[in-house]
Amino acid sequence: MSSVSTTAPRFAQRFLEVADWLEAEGASPYADRIRSILADSGAVTTYTAAFCGLFSAGKSSLVGALAGKRLKTGANPTTAEVEAVEVEVEGGTLRLLDTPGIDSTDERHREATMNALYQADLVAVVTDYQHVEADANLELLQMFAVSDKPLLFIVHQVDKHLEAELPFEAFAESVRELAADYGVDASRVFFTAVRPSAHSQLDELRAFLVATAEAALGTDGEPMIRRMVEVAREGVSACYESEWKQRAKAVEEISGRAPQTLDEAREWLWDAKRRAEALVQEEAEQRQRLKALVETLRDGWLRAVDLAQIAPYETAEKGRRYIDSLRADFKVGVFRSTKKTEAEREARLKAFVDDLAEKVENFLARPLSAEMAQQIREVGLQAAAEERLIERCQGLRVRVDAAYVQACVKPGSLVSAEYGHQFVRDVQDRVRREMRAQVQEIGEALSAAVEEHIQMEERERAPERDAAERWCQVLRSYVEFGEQYESALAAVTQGEVPRGE
């Protein structure tokens, strides 16, 4: 670690730790710049203005005229170096930096210019009268327009102006409009010349620089702190830039464009999460709806079985008469012949069986089968599954015959006069149990078919659901990284090392 000036001790150690963090993160140039600022014993009492522009803009003559000194000038832009002149002002020193031309072909001079700019509290973009709209000058304006560093736009060598060609005020207004496009207020646009010119604002520019320096130097080291903060923030940007671009590219690949701000990305993420959650919710609601529908249908079918009028009074009476014929004392005919008695039993059995079978078919099996088939069609299953279930519905049957009815007789109960009523109930219960069992089986088959249908729909929607989740992940990654970036910027702005990266 380099030696540190004893000035501004409250901030020195904090920013040296920031510099160490930047170096550890691979941003050594920015760490070195912070250390060089801290190593400058005059940093707290010096306000620095850097003049930059094309080689031919006359920066050296302008800086010399402002300082009242003659600076060396080079005819070759590749030989120019940064030169500093100092002017004593109230509270400290105003340092003016004459930087190499930004059109230099030597990379060392470009680096020298950048080093001068990071040390500056104020940047003045200088253009000569004849090259106001040179691309390089406009690029400089654009570069510094987005920074917090105070920016001046100076048109030098206005002694070349010919009033006969264009009124100077019209020229000046066009320059101010150009500067305004880059956020430079008209009060920070100056026209200068070192030769006599009625349009030169050299004295006004000098007074502006002195007043600005004196105001800043009265703030207990604020210019130096601002420079370190600016370098630290640039270092953070350098650390995050590559990954930031990758995450922005991932967003752009999906949406077609990258968010302009982190707040916009947060809005996108909120919308994406809501969409993804809606898809999941829609699937859950669809599953719940179909499952509930199956339960409702099955309960309705079973209730229809229980309520079907398969043994109205006339039918029940035939059943009771059949039971009466089974009692030991039942005889038919004058002579009570066994043959006639047996024939009567058979007749009563047949009457009950035929009536009951007809009621079971017409009041239970057939209407229930039709109702179930229609309701299954309304569920919206796949055609094959629907057809299989309807076939099962059409096969609903309880085959009531003599043996079926006789199996319900309890001989030991024939002695009871009320057994006829119980017998009819027993027969009905058997019919209902068997029909309920068939309905339950169809209900379970319907439930399985619905589950298969749900899973098929979920598979079909999987690409949309996965795309929504992927979009959430990409945006979440972007936002989380952006928040880390913001947190790191906020930390170094306070002279603190970013934590929890």
Image (cartoon, rainbow, N blue to C red):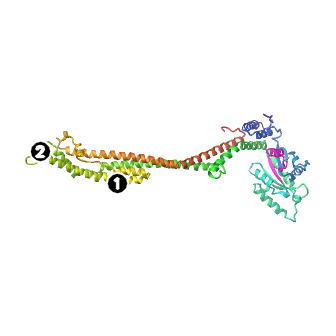
Residue 22 in the image, given as x and y percentages of width and height: 73, 38
Residue 378 figure quarter: bottom left
Q: Secondary structure at mark 1?
A: helix
- Horizontal side of 412 relative to 477 (left or right) equals left
Can you say whether 395 is above or below 415 in the image? below
Question: Decide: marks 2, 1 in contact (CB < 8 A)?
Answer: no
Residue 332 in the image, given as x and y percentages of width and height: 11, 47
Q: Which mark is residue 338?
A: 2
Magenta-span inclusion, residue 113: yes
Q: What amino acid is at disc 2?
A: Thr
Which residue does the image show at 66% across and 48% down from the upper left? 249
Closest to the observer, 433 or 49:
433
- Horizontal side of 329 relative to 303 (left or right) equals left
Q: Secondary structure at mark 2?
A: helix
Q: Which residues are magenta?
A: 100-126
Closest to the observer, 391 or 256:
391
Closest to the observer, 230 or 324:
324
The residue that disc 1 covers is 370
- Horizontal side of 284 relative to 255 (left or right) equals left
Which quarter of the image is occupied by the N terminus? top right
Mark 2 or mark 1: which is in front?
2
Residue 131 in the image, given as x and y percentages of width and height: 84, 57
Q: Which mark is residue 52?
A: none
Magenta-span inclusion, residue 34: no
Q: Residues within 10 Å of mark 1 (few under 14, many from 20)?
A: some
Furthest-left residue in this view: 335
